[in-house]
Image (cartoon, helix red, strand yellow):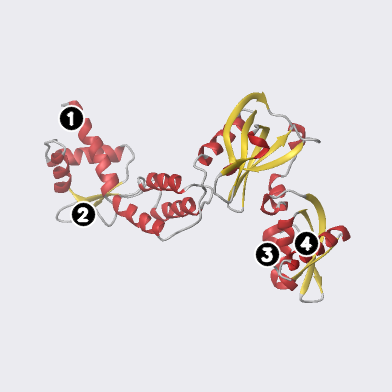
Amino acid sequence: MKNESQHALLLLRQYLYQQTDEQHPVSVTDILAFWQQHGIQAGRKSVYTDIELLQNAGMDIVCVKSSQNKYFVGQRLFELPELKLLVDAVQSSKFLSVKKSRELIRKLEGLASRWEAQSLQRQVYAVGRVKSMNESIYYSIDTIHTAISQDRQIAFRYFEWTMEKTVRYRRDGQLYERSPYALVWDDENYYLVAYDHTASPPGIRHYRVDKMANLSVLEESRLGKATFDGFDMAQYAKQMFGMFGGAQQDVELRFAARLAGVVLDRFGKEVTLLPDGGSFFRVHVQAVVSPQFMGWVAGFGTDAKLLGPPAVVREYTAFCREMLAQYE
């Protein structure tokens, strides 16, 4: 009898959590019918007793007073607007594959009533974005976090996609052994920032997590701690355009005044904007000079101009000429 009472209580908790919300309360008659479907014979007094037990245990069960009282779960771990926000974040995350996105969204739906879950599903179907083709990235991120917390090195193989949509491993598939220090989110991708002790000279490198395979945690402790002492990870990410490599330099740029917000978004509010002729401003920033950086500047057309240093201006001029040569 005791086991049956406990079973009835657990079933009631599940029923209220999954089947009720403010728009869909249930009556005592509904609960008794649900119990009966699961082979439990009980009276109305048992319903009142079990609801009180659940309320005393912290479950927010709201009673709607009427000729036939009805009940629903009020406050949940997440409110519906919060769940919609989380679902949209999962769906819009390019680094998650379609399969993993669906698995996570299904789990989030379990935190809402069945009726609220339907509104989450409608929101998902309304959104279509390019997703990662690497199913293992979800677990790679967890492995990297584990290595960082345990102060251990990692090993992995690094690949790129070919025109045939097949994987081609770099360095003939040899393992990369690195000391992981941080994960950076940039341009809808996760990047590992690590210390490469095999390079000449050794130093900081970054790698796209969705292009890592056969990732494992090694027994060796991390190297490069002195390099990362006082290292500003946020500043590092801000200077890397699309996380492509290149030489970091102090560059001077001239922008149309209307692009002030774009520049501040890219380089941070700490940079100084110097008025230049009323409708323009000049700015000195630290940036990694790469083709991606030059493409970013070129994208503003005549509203942006690279002023210095001279070597970077020459490099940018050559970049633009090469681009134009394709159309001559």
Distance CA(mark 1)–CA(mark 3): 64 Å
Where is 22 relative to 34, above or below?
below
Task: Say which label, 2 or 4, has the lower sequence index.
Answer: 2
Task: Say which label, 4 or 3, has the lower sequence index.
Answer: 3
Depth check: 318 or 256 in front?
318
Task: Say which label, 1 or 4, has the lower sequence index.
Answer: 1
Query: Is residue 285 found left or right of 46 in the rendered image?
Result: right
Distance CA(mark 1)–CA(mark 4): 77 Å
Assess whether mark 4 and mark 1 are in contact (beta carbons under 8 angstroms): no
Nearest to the eye among marks 2 and 4: give it: 4
Q: In the drawing, what numbered circle is on residue 65?
A: 2
Image location of residue 222, percent across then percent down: 69, 29
Check disc 1 and give the amino acid type.
Answer: Glu
Is residue 115 visible in the rendered image? The answer is yes
Which quadrant of the view contains residue 217? top right
Check disc 3 and give the amino acid type.
Answer: Val
Image location of residue 235, percent across then percent down: 72, 49
Q: Farthest residue toward the top?
A: 219
Distance CA(mark 2)–CA(mark 3): 55 Å
Secondary element type, mark 1: helix
Write down the residue under mark 4.
319
Check disc 2 and give the amino acid type.
Answer: Lys
Image location of residue 110, percent across then percent down: 35, 45
Distance CA(mark 4)–CA(mark 3): 23 Å
Assess whether mark 3 and mark 2 are in contact (beta carbons under 8 angstroms): no
Image location of residue 246, percent across then percent down: 76, 49
Q: In the drawing, what numbered circle is on residue 4?
A: 1
Depth check: 216 or 86 in front?
216
Distance CA(mark 2)–CA(mark 1): 29 Å
